[in-house]
Each structure stands twice: as structure tokens, then as C-alpha cells.
Amino acid sequence: MRYMQPYRARIFAALAFLFLYSGLQVSGPLLTKLAVDRYLAPTGQRLLLDPMLAADPFTGLTQIAALYLLVLAGIFITEFAQLYLMQYVGQLAMFDLRRELMAHMQKLDLKFFDHNPVGRLVTRLTTDVDVLNDLFASGLVTILGDLLTLTFIVAAMLQMSLGLTVIMLAVLPFVVWATARFRTSVSGSYRRIRVAIARINAYLQEHITGMTVLQLFNRESKSTAEFEEINKQHMIAFKDSIGAYGWFYPVVEFLAYLSLAMILSYGGFRVKGGLLSLGVMVAFLQYGLRFFRPIQDLSEKYNILQAAMASAERIFNLLDTPATIVAPTAPLAFPDTEASIVFDQVWFAYKDEDWVLRDLSFTIHPGETVAIVGHTGAGKTTIISLLLRFYDVGRGAIRIGGVDIRDMDPLVLRRHFGVVLQDPYLFTGTIADNIRLGTETVKLEDIADAAEQVNLTDFIRTLPEGFNQPIRERGASLSTGQKQLISFARALAHRPRFLILDEATSSVDTETELRVRRALEQMVKGRTSIVIAHRLSTIQRADRILVMHKARLRESGTHQELLAGRGLYWKLYQLQYQDQEDGISREVAHDEAFVG
């Protein structure tokens, strides 16, 4: 109801049209009764009062026909207005709901997305919202319309003949029983249908995104079999609902015609005996046809309501999911002056007490370039996620300029960091759009300057439209190295005070790495920088190197100091360069043998 509140004027107008529509629905049989009793089959008493009725009924029938035409026109206008207004209100409400869902999801922390597949979330914003739209547009108000129509019909029938009304309502308990059985059988299948649709969307999203790997490992037949099983569950759930529909409508229709047959029998004897006019019976036959149609519609609307309840439950569970990473009530300002980054006895676990970081303490001074190395799973990327407050620390604190980052607004905190990730992500749009990312303060001159610094300009010159060159989804038309250079330009164009490079050169070729390495020398000047790298060649000139091992900080020092210590870093260096030397030796031996 909160989403309909802003549009209450349109809703009240729709209700007014609905009230008129329900009243007009009752008018048709009344006009038919009038035409039959006064002009087509007038009783003897009425003929005695007005002999001209039998002699010249044309004028009266013409007037009634014209009135009937006006009623039909009124029904058309009121039904159109009511449907248009409610469909329009439904779209406006769903627009607001989708906007709120998207805005809320962007506030949720990464832990939420770690446990919720993308396909399931897409289903919430698409299919589930569409079901709620059906409830808004053709459910709530039309249920009221059906109830109004039934009320008006019963009132009109009671006024004309109590006996025929009782006969009409005699089958109502059986209709109620059939409707209750129908609702019970179909509600469970609707829930299963929604769950199956979410599973289908999640599976499709995952496998379409990973199509390269799927085809590379010849997994097409296995994927098809898995999808067939998921799709089968959806089909079975739908078959149950089809079965319920298959018996319900014939049962209600049978009961409707049964009541009409009883009216015809009872009313026929009453008409023959002169106790009932023919017009009343004709009107009752018309009311009988109109009486059961709203009952069928109510059952259909109940199904819409059931489906909407299931969808609403999932939608509002998502909206009610609290964001754990939020700005404090009175956030502290980000330090304006040069500031150190301090990790003070930081502990962190993604789940329970399975610690990814243990008692981590170090300081990064202003303007210093610090590299973080270690084996996979040592906690390097987690350090960055905590610094940017994608997750909150379990114990300890992270401070920038003496201010705990939990006392800052996360949006303000992240604004001061430029980040380049291992897997560059590009959006559909142009190259300029992907560098700017909607930041209005980033001008075209800033984009060009950033591209020049990271050696991207030569590539841009080869494009027909330069920075306005369109990019397909995830940068499908670009190489990995080109996408990574765009990510570098994106980080620099925003002029960050702090720079974070997370395995930024691991996915580029040697030539591109040399170009990027020269660009890095320019990028880190005057900035506090954190570099995570597996390739030790990229971090040898760092002011300090932190060596992570099994969730703890084991060593810290310059490249030469760590080599002299002959500890973990020395072992990593030996392993990496021994592999390279062995590879070069094998390559030389192969070339010599080939030449020989």
C-alpha cells in the first residue's frame, strides 16, 4: 500500500469508475425485463391499462434499445478508464519498487552477494515485480469490482423474486467448496513455479557468463542435462496448476448452468401460472450468466494474490535485509592532510572464527609504496577489502590519519581510493563512459591525460571513434590487456589520494606489463600506494614489502633486506626466478638442438 499511496488520486478515480461499471452491469437485464414485460409479452392487466402497448411497441422498444446502447457505451468507457488508471498506477508503483530494490541492493555489503546468486536477484527485480504488478493492476481493485457486481446483482434479484434468488444461490455452497479446493491445489504449485523460475535464471546467468569455459571443456551435454532437470521441476509445478484449472472452470460452469436450468423449470411454471412475469425470468437468466463470472474471476484473482504473496515475501525479504556496512549517525570527515594507514591488531573471518587474518598490524606512511606478497589464500586481497570497508574487521581497527574507518561514511572513504583489480570489469557504453563511470567532475581532458599516463593513447588513436568507441558487455571486443589499461586510466582519471593495485599486471602479456610498469612509476609518485602482486618483478622498487603467510604478517622490509634475511620472501623469489631460469634454459637447449 505504501507504493500506491503517492497515486491515491488516480486510485480513487479508478474506484469511482469501477463503482459505475458495476452498477451499469446490473442495468442491462433490468432493461431487458422492461422491454419484455411492457412491449414484447405484456400481461393482460398491463394491456387493459394501456392498449397501445400491443398495437405499437416500436417506439418504446426503440427508446429502450437506445438506453441499452448508452449503458453499453457507459460500460465501455468506465471499464476502459478503470483498467487504464489501474494499469498506469501499477506501472508507476512497480517503477518505484524496482528503483528502491536497485538502490537497496547497491547499499548491501559484499557478504550478501557472496551468498546470493545473480540470477536469483535478477528474478526479484523482474519476474517477482511483474507478478506484483498483476496484483496492483488487475488484482486488488478488480476483486473489489467483482464483489460490487455480485452485491448489485443479488440486490436486484432479491427485489424481483425471492424464490428465484434462493434457487440461484442454492448452488453457491458447491461453488465455494470447489473454489476452496482449487485454491488449495493451485497455491502450492505457484510457489514452486516461482522457486523454479529463480533457479532457471540463476543457472542461465552462471552458464551464459561462463560459456567459454563450458565449451572449452566440452561440457555442453552435461550442462544441457542439468538444465533439463531444473526446467523439468518448473514444468511439473506448472502441470499441477494446469490440472487445477482444468477441472475448476468446468465445475463452476456446470453449476452455473445447473442453476439456470432450475430457474428455467421453476420460473417456467410460475410464468405459466401467472405468478411471475416473463421479463423477470429472462432477467434472471441474464443475471445467472453474470453472477458466476465474477466468482470465476475471484478465483483467478485469488491465484494472482497467492502468486503475489509469494513474490512479495521474497521481494520484501530482500528489502528488509539490513546493510551492515553503513555510515554512522555522525560520520567523521576524511583527513584533509597527509595521512597514514594503520592496521592495528586486525582479525577477520568470512565465516565464524575461520580466521583469514590474524593479529595483523602495520603502518603505511604518506607517499609510501607498499607491496603485499604471499601465497594464494594468504589474505592479501582481504586486506584491501577491509581497507575499503567492503567488510568490517572482526577485531582490532583500521585507521586513516588517526580516524577509524568505521567512523567515516563508506562513500566518502572509497572516493579517495583508486583501485585496479585483477579482473577488469567494463560496462556497456563507450571507453570514455567506462573511464568516467558517471563522475561529472571527470572531464574529457582528465580522461585523455590519464590515458596518456598509462600508455593507452596509442590504442585509442587506432579506434574509429576514439574515446567514444562503443564497448559491448564486459568489454567483449577488447583484449585483456586493453581492458586492464582502461582500468588503469579509470583509476587515475579520478585523481585519487591513495592507489590500490590488486594483481593488476597478472593478466597482461610481457610487452604490456613493461608498458604498465613504466606507467606505474608515474602513477605512484606523490600517492600512497598499495600493490598486490604475484610477479615479484613488479614490486622490487616498492618502499616496503609485506610478506603474508597463513593469515599472518611474517616479514616486512625492502626487496634487498628481505632477500638478505633468506626467509619466506627469499624462498618465493628463488622459486619464481628458478622457474624462469629453467624455462629459459630449456628454450635455449631446444633452439640449439633445432639449429643443429
Image (tube, rainbow, N blue to C red):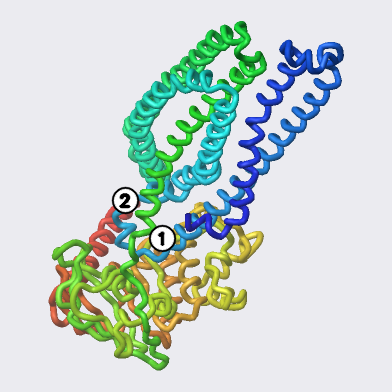
Contact (Cβ within 8 Å) of mark 2 with mark 1: no
The quadrant in which residue 461 appears is bottom right
Viewed as shown, does residue 86 lie left or right of 259?
Answer: right
Pick the residue in front: 65 or 269.
Answer: 269
Residue drawn at (33%, 70%), measured in percent from left and top? 325
Name the residue at the bottom extreme.
Answer: 337
Label 2 sits on residue: 596
Residue drawn at (73%, 32%), measured in percent from left and top? 71
Above or below residue 53? Residue 351 is below
Q: Regarding mark 2 in the picture, which secondary structure is present there?
A: loop
Pick the residue in front: 126 or 517.
Answer: 126
Can residue 507 be seen? yes
> Which is closer to the viewer, label 2 or label 1?
1
Total marks placed: 2
Label 1 sits on residue: 105
Viewed as shown, does residue 230 lie left or right of 450?
Answer: left
Residue type, numbered disc 1 = Met
Residue 412 position within the rendered picture, expressed as x and y whole percent measured from the top left:
42, 79
Residue type, numbered disc 2 = Gly
Residue 565 position within the rendered picture, expressed as x and y whole percent measured from the top left:
14, 81
Instruction: Give the distance between the C-alpha atoms of the residues marked 2 and 1, in whole angstroms.
Output: 65 Å
Residue 287 position within the rendered picture, expressed as x and y whole percent measured from the top left:
59, 23
The quadrant in which residue 339 appears is bottom left
Q: Regarding mark 1 in the picture, which secondary structure is present there?
A: helix
Residue drawn at (41%, 68%), measured in percent from left and top? 513
Q: Which mark sits nearer the N-terminus, 2 or 1?
A: 1
Above or below residue 481? Residue 80 is above
Residue drawn at (45%, 80%), measured in percent from left and top? 496
Above or below residue 478? Residue 367 is below
Q: Residues within 10 Å of mark 2 (few under 14, many from 20)?
A: few
Can residue 220 be seen? no
Q: Which mark is residue 72?
A: none
